[in-house]
């Protein structure tokens, strides 16, 4: 490991110099860049960042003389790059996912060690601009080899990389800025083979002084979270779009560390994408972790598949690694949120050059007004309007996502940019800073089932586009007989839909509804009588097992306090949910859910059941039974993974399914309609957004299924 010894020696020398400059400098000091053969150091008197030239990893970030990142040290206190070298994922506790400490892009610029060297250079020289800004670049040229050896990008054993693309990682720092920016440029050249990316993110593992998690303003995700209280990481996922600033604080050192996304254009899945932002790492170190996932398989995921010969590029970022200090975590969090607003106002940054990143004058604002017109239900109002410009739906170029070949929509796209903004309740909207291109305009809102779409919206550089009045007439299949819930793309309004972030929600369902749900229209309340998810019904044995306290780690879990590199207690058993939580509960029985309603008289024509799902896992269709007779199947249902990890979510991939049937199957008086989720693992089932039954007595009855 001669190389690693050289790296360590160079690192110590470089950091010593940088720390001396920081001590002697004021907050308005000029930015400097120093370097040796292995590292760059960026310093502005507030923070010092050290970047590995071999990979683009950030291996140190110091603020007020304190190391903010998790680092691995030898017995003598020196940094240990023998065990955890930059750009190589050798032997962690979970070698394919969580090996590195410090900070890293999962798809680093190095590629497999020994197959090609990255090129490191200074792209903004502070000596040429009076110390206003510095930027360094580490770029790996693929030459058709697979790149990315960081955690999540491949396996430590295969060692063959992951994604065929040139990868350039940059870090930038300005005068007076309390942090460092990073961004990554992917470029698949026309001469390269077909390729598909896996998990793709930037992650930072923080020093153990950080003990307060700050994701939002709820007590569940804004709390003291010491290592000893480690919980399932899926308990803390949230919608990325709503959380531009998030991170951790230290209650002992009174410092904070945050990621700040000034834009969501480079993220995947649009404004409903649920993702990890913060959690404790899933190994014995349990480092406080901050993540910027721009592509993942979580909650349905989103994909990037590039065809052979296709020229494709994407710029992810820049976003800010922000540090601050304050009297308590809430002060620091409010400061980070204020900083996020400032960063958003500066977007796009004028200092980014040399790549496909249009500045302000190369973009445009797209505006207009949605006009909701619903002749059948004119009283319907919309709220929480979201409007976006996205790449048109397309067939993926590669072997398909995790569920095989599929049409890619804005919910499952990570390949292209998306531009979303919140509109007003009166329908007015403005989407700023849109890159030139041809898009589809999408809109959806609380209170309205379905989605507005307008194709072929062409945006030109520097030319504001006013689309005027856009008439939105929601789809109707006749008059409305009844509805359950609120069309809002998640299950939050249903029972436990506001308290879903716990393990064992399926067990909770079985306890609360031992005889399953019978929802009576006009009498039952969806807030208390309709459980947000419908999994298979847990057995009495599974309920009893869930109520038994655990006193020892399960197979596949790390024992508390286990040293780095220690083996787990055994291989995780088949069927174990992700996250090392032990074996899955026994399969449950089929779960019927009955809706009981009255009609004043017999009807004819076509009745249409319309169901909007916000999560569907390994349930391909649901039998529909009317008044005791099975009439057919509701489906096929679009699949995601929302219930796959212990069910800790209320939304994944939203979709609507319709089931039309002969209305004469209904009768005067009391009727029942039953939807049954089949028997199976408790990590399968559906999550509801909204249900509605409509009747068109003038339509010819459909043929029986």
Image (tube, rainbow, N blue to C red):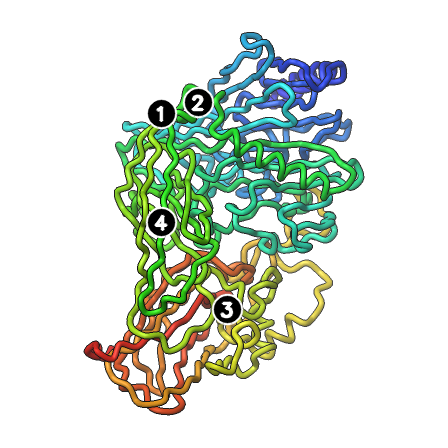
Q: Quadrant of the C terminus?
A: bottom left
Q: Position of residue 121 (x, y in %)?
A: 50, 15
What residue is rendered at 60% in x and 26% in y?
180
Q: Nearer the viewer, mark 4 or mark 3?
A: 4
Badges 4 and 1: C-beta atoms under 8 Å apart?
Answer: no
Tag 2 or tag 3, which sits nearer the N-term? 2
- Residue at disc 4, secondary structure: strand
Residue density around tag 3, few if under 14, some if 14–19, many if 20 or more, within 10 Å: many
User: Is disc 2 in contact with disc 1, using a CB cutoff of under 8 Å?
Assistant: yes
Residue 309 in view, yes or no = yes
Of mark 4 and mark 1, the one earlier in the sequence is 1
Asked if the residue at tag 2 contacts the one at tag 3, i.e. Cβ–Cβ closer than 8 Å, the answer is no
Asked if 631 appears above or below 373 in the picture, the reply is below
Q: Position of residue 50 (x, y in %)?
A: 62, 22
Secondary element under disc 3, as helix, strand or loop, is strand
Give the distance between the C-alpha atoms of the residues marked 2 and 4, in whole angstroms. 43 Å
Task: Find residue 641 and report its horizontal and vertical position in percent.
Answer: 46, 57
Q: Looking at the image, is mark 2 or mark 4 earlier in the sequence? A: 2
Residue corresponding to mark 3? 533
Q: Secondary structure at mark 2?
A: loop
* Disc nearest the viewer among 2 and 4: 4
Q: Nearer the viewer, residue 257 or 456?
A: 456
Separation of residues labelled 4 and 1 (CA atoms): 38 Å
Residue topped by disc 1 = 143
In the rendered image, is residue 35 in sight? no
Is 673 situated above or below 503? below
Disc assigned to residue 442: 4
- The residue labelled by disc 2 is 116
Q: Which numbered disc flags the more N-terminal residue, 3 or 1?
A: 1
| Mark 4 Cα-neighbour bin, 10 Å: few <14, some 14–19, many ≥20 | some
Q: Quadrant of the N terminus?
A: top right
Q: Residues within 10 Å of mark 1 (few under 14, many from 20)?
A: some
């Amino acid at each position: 490991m001669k190389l690693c010894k050289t790296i360590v020696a160079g690192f110590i020398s470089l950091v010593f110099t940088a720390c001396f400059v920081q001590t002697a400098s004021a907050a308005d000091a000029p930015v400097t860049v120093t370097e040796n053969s292995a590292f760059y150091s960026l310093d502005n008197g507030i923070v010092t960042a050290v970047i590995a030239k071999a990979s683009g990893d950030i291996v140190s970030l110091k603020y007020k003389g304190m190391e903010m990142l998790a680092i691995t040290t030898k017995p003598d206190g020196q940094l240990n790059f023998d065990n955890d070298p930059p750009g190589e994922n050798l032997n962690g506790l979970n070698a394919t996912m969580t090996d590195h400490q410090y900070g890293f892009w999962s798809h680093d610029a190095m590629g497999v060690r020994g197959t090609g060297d990255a090129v490191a250079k200074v792209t903004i020289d502070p000596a040429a601009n009076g110390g206003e800004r510095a930027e360094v670049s580490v770029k790996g040229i693929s030459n058709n080899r697979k790149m990315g050896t960081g955690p999540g990008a491949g396996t430590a054993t295969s060692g063959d990389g992951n994604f065929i693309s040139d990868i350039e990682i940059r870090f930038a720092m300005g005068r007076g800025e309390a942090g460092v920016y990073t961004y990554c440029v992917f470029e698949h050249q026309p001469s390269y083979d077909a390729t598909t990316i896996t998990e793709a993110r930037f992650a930072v593992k923080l020093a153990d002084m950080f003990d307060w998690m700050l994701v939002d303003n709820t007590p569940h995700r804004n709390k003291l979270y010491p290592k000893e209280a480690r919980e399932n990481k899926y308990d803390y996922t949230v919608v990325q779009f709503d959380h531009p600033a998030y991170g951790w604080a230290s209650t002992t050192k009174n410092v904070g560390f945050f990621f700040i996304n000034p834009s969501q254009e480079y993220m995947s899945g649009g404004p409903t994408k649920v993702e990890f932002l913060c959690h404790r790492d899933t190994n014995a170190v349990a480092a406080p972790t901050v993540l910027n996932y721009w592509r993942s398989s979580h909650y349905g995921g989103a994909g990037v598949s590039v065809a052979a010969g296709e020229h494709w590029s994407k710029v992810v970022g820049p976003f800010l690694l922000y540090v601050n200090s304050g009297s308590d975590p809430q002060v620091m969090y409010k400061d980070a949120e204020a900083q996020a607003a400032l960063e958003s106002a500066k977007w796009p940054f004028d200092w980014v050059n040399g790549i496909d990143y249009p500045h302000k004058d190369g973009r445009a604002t797209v505006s207009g007004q949605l006009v909701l017109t619903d002749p059948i239900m004119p009283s319907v109002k919309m709220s929480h309007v979201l409007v976006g410009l996205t790449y048109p739906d397309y067939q993926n170029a590669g072997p398909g996502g995790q569920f095989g070949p599929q049409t890619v929509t804005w919910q499952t796209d990570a390949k292209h940019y998306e531009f979303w903004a919140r509109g007003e309740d009166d329908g007015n909207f403005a989407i700023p800073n849109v890159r030139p291109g041809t898009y589809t305009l999408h809109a959806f809102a609380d209170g309205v089932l379905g989605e507005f779409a307008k194709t072929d919206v062409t945006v030109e550089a520097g030319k504001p586009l006013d689309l005027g009045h856009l008439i939105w007439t929601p789809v109707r299949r006749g008059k409305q007989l009844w509805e359950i819930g609120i069309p809002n793309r998640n299950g939050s309004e249903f029972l436990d839909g506001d308290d879903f972030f716990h393990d064992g929600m399926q067990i909770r369902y079985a306890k609360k509804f031992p005889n399953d749900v019978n929802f009576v229209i006009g009498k039952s309340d969806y807030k208390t009588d309709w459980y947000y998810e419908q999994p298979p019904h847990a057995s009495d044995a599974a309920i009893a097992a869930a109520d038994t306290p655990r006193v020892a780690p399960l197979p596949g879990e790390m024992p508390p306090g286990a040293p780095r590199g220690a083996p787990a207690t055994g291989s995780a058993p088949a069927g174990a949910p992700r996250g090392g939580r032990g074996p899955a509960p026994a399969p449950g029985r089929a779960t019927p859910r009955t809706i009981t309603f009255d009609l004043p008289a017999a009807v004819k024509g076509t009745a249409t059941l319309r169901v909007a799902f916000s999560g569907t896992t390994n349930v391909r269709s649901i039998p529909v039974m009317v008044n005791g007779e099975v009439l057919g199947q509701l489906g096929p249902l679009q699949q995601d993974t929302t219930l796959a990890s212990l069910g800790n979510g209320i939304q994944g991939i939203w979709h609507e399914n319709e089931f039309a049937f002969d209305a004469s199957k209904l009768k005067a008086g009391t009727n029942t309609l039953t939807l049954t989720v089949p028997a199976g693992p408790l990590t399968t089932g559906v999550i509801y957004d909204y249900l509605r039954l409509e009747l068109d007595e003038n339509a010819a009855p459909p043929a029986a299924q």
